[in-house]
Image (spheres, rainbow, N blue to C red):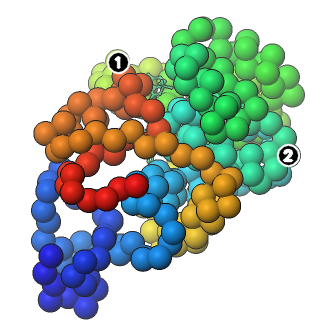
Amino acid sequence: MESNSARYHVGDIVSGVTGWQEWVIADDSNKFSVIPKGMGLDLATVMNVVGLTGITAYFGLLDVGAFKESDIVVVSGAAGATGSVAGQIAKARGAKKVVGIAGGPEKCAEVVESYGFDECLDYREGHLARRLHESCPKGVDLYFDNVGGEILDAVLSNIAMKGRVVLCGAISQYNAMEKSRGIANTSMLIMRRGRMEGFLVLDYGSRFQEAQMDLAGMVLEGTLAHHEHLVQGIEHAPEALNLLFTGGNHGKTLVVVDESVQLS
Ligand SMILES: NC(=O)c1ccc[n+]([C@@H]2O[C@H](COP(=O)([O-])OP(=O)(O)OC[C@H]3O[C@@H](n4cnc5c(N)ncnc54)[C@H](OP(=O)(O)O)[C@@H]3O)[C@@H](O)[C@H]2O)c1
């Protein structure tokens, strides 16, 4: 709206971490990134796949997970913002098989039909370890974990020799407080000489542009499908946040603070 800074110009659209708020006074310490003009993508897409969750999927899969062509990849939270992108990158880069894990038949259908995964297992049906074994009899080379808990255990029991587990998130445990669940199958990493590694996307701050260029390119060439779940009005932010825990969101959840802004 107004600027005395060399970093930000009037009319720039910027992205960064703030509280839930309609206005912010930015100074150089905020380190907002200015969204480049002329990317050919609408703002909702930029906030989704080219934004933090897309970048998380990108570096989590390729860098932390050391993705290799012909890997058998499993992604939990597969219908969500981060998971849907992780699986699509794996598919686009030549994974032998990409299996999603999501809650309910509708989301599983979306993961296969919209996001192009080879298969999707509904964790609510139970017996996940056995069903994963049927789906990946040679084991899982790379597991991109968004949820932790029982699902992580089921995948660990199916990990392949030299398998890698990327700990991106543990959403099944965030509200568990003192009852958070222990993981039983870490000894499989010994037997299969595997490794498990956590990361935060902020670790990759200096390389964001690299991911953004690749992700934007995939959207423009039609190899990265995406869906935004828009919730109108900052007064609905608590309900929007809760959708992530109930699974009521479809795709990237965005709260639209300024309803006059053109998103798509
Ligand atoms: N490491 C990082 O830097 C980083 C950055 C961004 C996000 N993350 C993490 O990535 C994960 C995904 O975040 P997102 O923003 O992309 O959200 P999202 O996947 O769009 O939404 C969260 C999804 O989690 C699933 N879920 C919720 N409770 C669950 C449970 N008890 N068991 C299994 N699945 C459950 C739900 O899907 P279903 O309907 O399929 O159950 C829900 O739709 C989160 O754990 C988040 O903390 C990490």
Q: CA distance from mark 2 to mark 1?
A: 38 Å
Q: Is mark 1 within 8 Å of ligand 1?
A: no
The residue at the point 60 percent across, 8 percent down is 126
Q: Quadrant for residue 179, please give it.
A: top left
Task: Specify the quadrant that holds the C terminus.
Answer: bottom left
The residue at the point 26 percent across, 59 percent down is 261
Amino acid on which disc 2 is placed: Ser
The earlier-in-sequence mark between 2 and 1 is 2
Is 189 left or right of 64, judged from the image as shown? right
Task: Specify the quadrant that holds the N terminus.
Answer: bottom left
Q: Which residue is mark 2?
A: 70
Amino acid on which disc 1 is placed: Lys
Q: Secondary structure at mark 2?
A: loop
Q: Is residue 167 visible?
A: no
Q: Is mark 2 within 8 Å of ligand 1?
A: no
Q: Quadrant for residue 152, please give it.
A: top right
Residue 220: x and y in percent read: 62, 62
Compare residues 2 and 59 and report the one nearer the observer. Answer: 2
Mark 2–mark 1 contact, CB under 8 Å?
Answer: no
Q: Residues within 10 Å of mark 2 (few under 14, many from 20)?
A: some
The residue at the point 33 percent across, 65 percent down is 15
Q: Which residue is mark 1?
A: 179
Residue 74: x and y in percent read: 68, 34
Residue 92: x and y in percent read: 74, 51
Q: Residues within 10 Å of mark 1 (few under 14, many from 20)?
A: few
Q: Is residue 254 visible?
A: yes
Per the rendering, the mark at residue 31 is none
Is 161 left or right of 259, judged from the image as shown? right
181 relative to 29, above or below: above
